[in-house]
Image (spheres, helix red, strand yellow):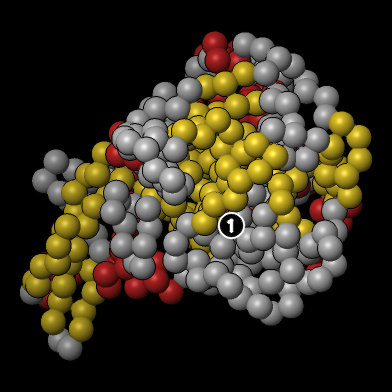
Amino acid sequence: MKRFLLPAGGALLATGLLAAGLAGTAQAADDIATDPMANNTREAASVASFWAASNGAALRAASAYTWDAAEVKKVVQKGGYSPDGKPGMTAPTGTSGTGRSQNVNLPKTIGKVFFVDTAGKYRWCSATSIQSNYRNLVATAGHCVYDTDGNADTLSKWVFVPGYYQGKSPWGIYVGKQAFTHYDFDVYEDYDRDFAFVTVYNGIDFDGVKQVDRKDYESFTGPKWSRGGHYYIALSKDAGRLGDNVGGQGFAWNQPTGKPVRAFGYPYAPHPDGNKPYSGVTPKTCYGPTTAKKVGASWLKIEEHVGLKCAVTPGYDGGPWLTGYSNAKRTGYVNGVTSTFADQDGNDRIDWITSPYFDGETASVYNAAKNVWSGKIVGPRGELYK
């Protein structure tokens, strides 16, 4: 797949990719890169079928997209942040809980993104649904979308599964259609821009299994499998738009640092010393103030990250940092995504995570993505579009 840069002139404006929501942000259209993922409904149906076949066997077989332990080092704090414009926010949408709780209510918007890496291994990262005009947008880390290890294009067979648990997809499987990121990450792998926004097709629900004869099996375009001389197909239905099912977190940029955020994700990998406290099955949360100073890590070209004290491990990559999180409503504003992991006290245990600072250029990428329509891949009779 070829990468495309969105033009800065009238062609971009004519497609409606930069809307009035850009007011107060750095409108640097040249900094926006976009890649196709599943180009059409037939390809999208094939991707969904891949993950859903054999009752989600591929989903269960996936493991966290882990970091090399040699890259878990101490990061350096230096200088303050200089926002590139006025601060701004886009309000969250969607379903919310009610009542009060002393525990942290997990947002319905979070889940896992699954993909196949360069080596052909089934992998996952953390992610969240985020508000968009068509309620079809996912926010995650750039390295959970673009193949930095293989220096290639987008990671293949990319899907988002909100609320994922043990092979189950309670609100459906959402296939990635188009990825948006910053030009500097797409081309130079600059981790100061390690964020991505991905538009997804309507979800697919697989609501049952039907045994069929070989002729029907061979002509079927959806998930299917054979066992012991018998043939099975998964019955499909349109799950609707992502944001209509789980809501979408808000978005915030050019915010002051040193303020509290709540981060979510699915930690899984061991610490550098081999200790493995997390299973990756259930999401975990961290809470605290971000660093007031810039965080730097020269080996990843990082100069302007934000740090958060948090002892989680890889698998947490791409999970949202939410400012203004309402425990009752289960919503807040995405003001970062987990990008890297750090060992600040040198004991071979991760004790910090970092995120790119979300500024006006981040807002430009988000605004470009939030106005792009996706569509659906399941027909009115439950057939997958060809």
Residue at point 84%, 63% (across, down)? 345
**Is residue 192 in view?**
no
Determine which quarter of the picture holds residue 375.
Answer: top left
Q: Where's residue 80, x and y in %?
A: 87, 31
Q: Please give the count of numbered marks on the rendered protein.
A: 1
Q: 10 Å neighbourhood of mark 1: few (<14), some, or many (≥20)?
A: many
Residue 112 or residue 115, whichever sits in front: 112
Identify the image quadrant of residue 227: bottom left
Q: Residue furthest bottom?
A: 228
Residue shown at 10% from the left, 67% from the top: 210
Task: State which quadrant residue 77 falls in.
Answer: top right
Residue drawn at (74%, 69%) of the image: 349
Q: Residue at x 78, y 23 (%)?
A: 83
Image spot of residue 14 (x, y percent):
52, 14
Q: Is 245 left or right of 337, judged from the image as shown?
A: left
Q: Residue furthest right?
A: 78
Q: Nearer the viewer, residue 354 or 30?
A: 354
Image vertical order of residue 145 relative to residue 233, above or below? above
In the displayed structure, 225 sits above or below 72; it is below
Q: Position of residue 276 (x, y in %)?
A: 61, 75
Q: Residue 385: image x %, image y %? A: 25, 47
Q: Callout 1: helix, strand or loop?
A: loop
Nearer to me, 294 or 232: 294
Q: Visible in this render: residue 94?
A: yes
Given the image, on which type of amino acid does mark 1 rest? Answer: Tyr
Q: Please indicate whether residue 29 sits to the left or right of residue 332 in the image.
A: right
Q: Report whether 74 appears left or right of 157.
A: right
Task: Name the residue beneath numbered marker 1.
Answer: 316
The answer to which of 299 and 234 lies nearer the viewer is: 299
